[in-house]
Image (cartoon, helix red, strand yellow):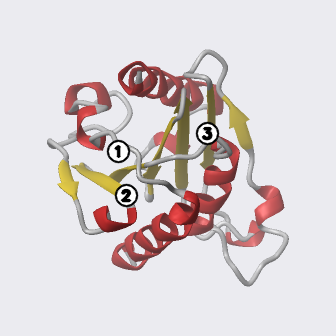
Amino acid sequence: MKTRYLGVLAGLAVLASTRLGHAQIPDPCALLTPAEMQPVFPGTKPGRIDRALEKNDILRCEWIYNSGRVVLIAGADGDEDLPVDDAKTFMMSFVDPRRPDAEHRVRFETLPGVGDKAVAVLERGDAGKGITQDGVVLVVRRGKRQVALLAVPPGNLTRLERADALRLLSDLGKVIAKRLG
């Protein structure tokens, strides 16, 4: 099941890259350290760079933690790229595609003070609402650079009070934004 969703994430990364140019891509593994990820994803091991999509101007970093994986995707972004658009694309990794109403149940949270713009998605799995499993998406933009962090499953993050979980994601986003500069 986890492998299927990682495959979906990889496919979505290719789809999200259709507007990408040929600018320098930031190393996604240099944007967060395991120590910075520990409060959100306990047991995080050092990230591994994935260059499989580099010819499509996409680099990924994958971190393994106690209950899953976190993937940070960086690409050569265009001026028209918006965090909410990427968040909507990646949200599809945990929304039932057979339920057209499911997308409308997902909450997109703007994170003030994180880069130029940042959006988080944090949802608990709920088959009745068309949310197939717990999922987290964090998209951060600073200048012309934009990256997306995905965690499916996101460990205990969706079990926290929503405000606390969003604060943790905001803290990660601030670190990412600082290094995107």
Q: Secondary structure at mark 3?
A: strand
Cβ–Cβ under 8 Å for marks 3 and 1: no
Q: Secondary structure at mark 1?
A: loop
Question: What residue sits right under mark 2 in the picture?
Answer: 58
Quadrant (top left/top right/bottom left/bottom right) for the N terminus:
bottom left
Question: What residue sits right under mark 3 in the picture?
Answer: 120
Cβ–Cβ under 8 Å for marks 3 and 2: no
Q: Residues within 10 Å of mark 3 (few under 14, many from 20)?
A: many
Foreground: disc 3 or disc 1: 1
Residue at 29% across, 31% down: 32
Residue 111 to residue 155: above or below:
above
Would residue 133 be seen by someone viewing this image from the given angle? no
Cβ–Cβ under 8 Å for marks 1 and 2: yes
Q: Residues within 10 Å of mark 1 (few under 14, many from 20)?
A: some
The mark that comes first in sequence, 3 or 2, is 2
Q: Quadrant of residue 27?
A: top left
* Residue 52 located left or right of residue 161: left
Q: Quadrant of residue 26?
A: top left
Position in image of residue 160 (x %, y %): 54, 35
The amino acid beneath tag 2 is: Ile
Residue 136 to residue 18: above or below:
above
Task: Name the mark on residue 35.
Answer: none
* Residue 24 located left or right of residue 152: left
The amino acid beneath tag 3 is: Ala
Residue 69 to residue 56: above or below:
above
The mark that comes first in sequence, 3 or 1, is 1
Position in image of residue 68 (x %, y %): 31, 56
The amino acid beneath tag 1 is: Ile
Question: What residue sits right under mark 1 in the picture?
Answer: 25
